[in-house]
Image (cartoon, helix red, strand yellow):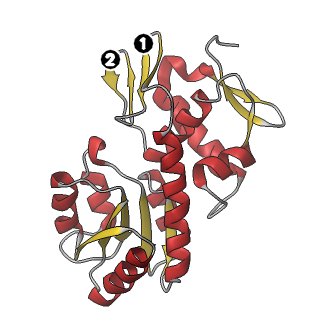
């Protein structure tokens, strides 16, 4: 796994680099969002550790300008712990959020959790899932409806992938939190419900294929119920 570390403080980048490489991860660095954006567009990374407050270009702006096809799992670091910042990050598709000062060991633990989930997704037997004009490409990490690319966050994509690969099975909210988020890093059952709501909106005419199972959670069905 190759990780891009983005922070305007060289000392923080150095500490993260040391801990990541001690755990077998390859790293690269950028001092602001603009440099990071260019690096991601022109190189391949598996995960992004991203500070918010930086000169030239902040972390949230970088995420907004990042092309859909270049989005990768992201852990945000911030000296600000306000709920608004966390929700903004999750709306932009980040996977996790750590408030500074943070424990480098905890950061590595969260990287490992994301790596484990990514490994699960890469071991899916089929490259694509197609239901009429709904198409999800597990290799390209893309979603299409009527041959039109649908702009979903990485987390929405992971939720849909997990439901499809367990289609017909009622999946509890706790199971979704465990398998998609890795652990309850922030929020509760409402985190799952919010992502399901956004995902249904993006699926349009296929929204009813994600069924609410009362008292349990959700399931994906091929025939609308």
Quarter of the image containing the C terminus? Answer: top right
Q: x%, y% of residue 7?
A: 30, 77
Q: Determine crowd level at label 2: few under 14, some 14-19, many 20+ residues with C-alpha closer than 10 A.
A: few
The picture quadrant where one finds residue 184 is bottom right
Could you tell me residue 167's position as x and y percent? 64, 24
At x 35%, y 79%, the residue is 17
Disc ID at residue 147: 2
CB-based contact (under 8 Å), mark 2 and mark 1: yes
Q: Residue at x 38, y 68 (%)?
A: 25
The answer for how far apart the CA atoms under marks 2 and 1 are is: 7 Å
Which numbered disc, 2 or 1, marks the residue that appears first in the sequence?
1
Can residue 46 be seen from the camera position used here?
yes
Tally the marks: 2
- How far across and how far down the image is residue 151, in percent? 36, 36
Q: Provide residue 96's location: percent of width, then percent of height.
A: 51, 62
Callout 1: SS:
loop
The numbered dot on residue 133 is 1
């Amino acid at each position: 796994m190759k990780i891009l570390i983005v922070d305007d403080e060289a000392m923080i980048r150095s500490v993260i680099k040391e801990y990541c490489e001690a755990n077998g991860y390859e790293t690269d660095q950028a001092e602001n969002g603009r440099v990071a954006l260019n690096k991601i567009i022109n190189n391949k990374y598996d995960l992004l550790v991203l500070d918010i407050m930086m000169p030239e270009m902040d972390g949230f702006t970088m995420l907004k300008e990042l092309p859909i096809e270049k989005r990768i799992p992201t852990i945000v670091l911030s000296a600000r712990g306000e709920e608004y910042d966390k929700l903004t990050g999750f709306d932009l598709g980040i996977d996790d959020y750590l408030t500074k000062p943070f424990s480098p060991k905890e950061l590595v633990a969260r990287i490992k959790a994301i790596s484990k989930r990514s490994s699960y997704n890469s071991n899916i037997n089929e490259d694509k899932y197609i239901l009429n004009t709904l198409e999800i490409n597990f290799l390209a990490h893309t979603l299409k409806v009527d041959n039109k690319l649908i702009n979903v966050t990485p987390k929405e994509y992971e939720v849909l992938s997990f439901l499809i690969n367990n289609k017909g099975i009622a999946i509890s909210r706790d199971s979704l939190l465990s398998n998609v988020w890795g652990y309850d890093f922030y929020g509760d059952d409402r985190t799952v419900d919010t992502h399901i709501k956004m995902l249904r909106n993006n699926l349009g005419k296929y929204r009813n294929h994600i069924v609410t199972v009362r008292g349990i959670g959700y399931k994906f069905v091929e025939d609308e119920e």
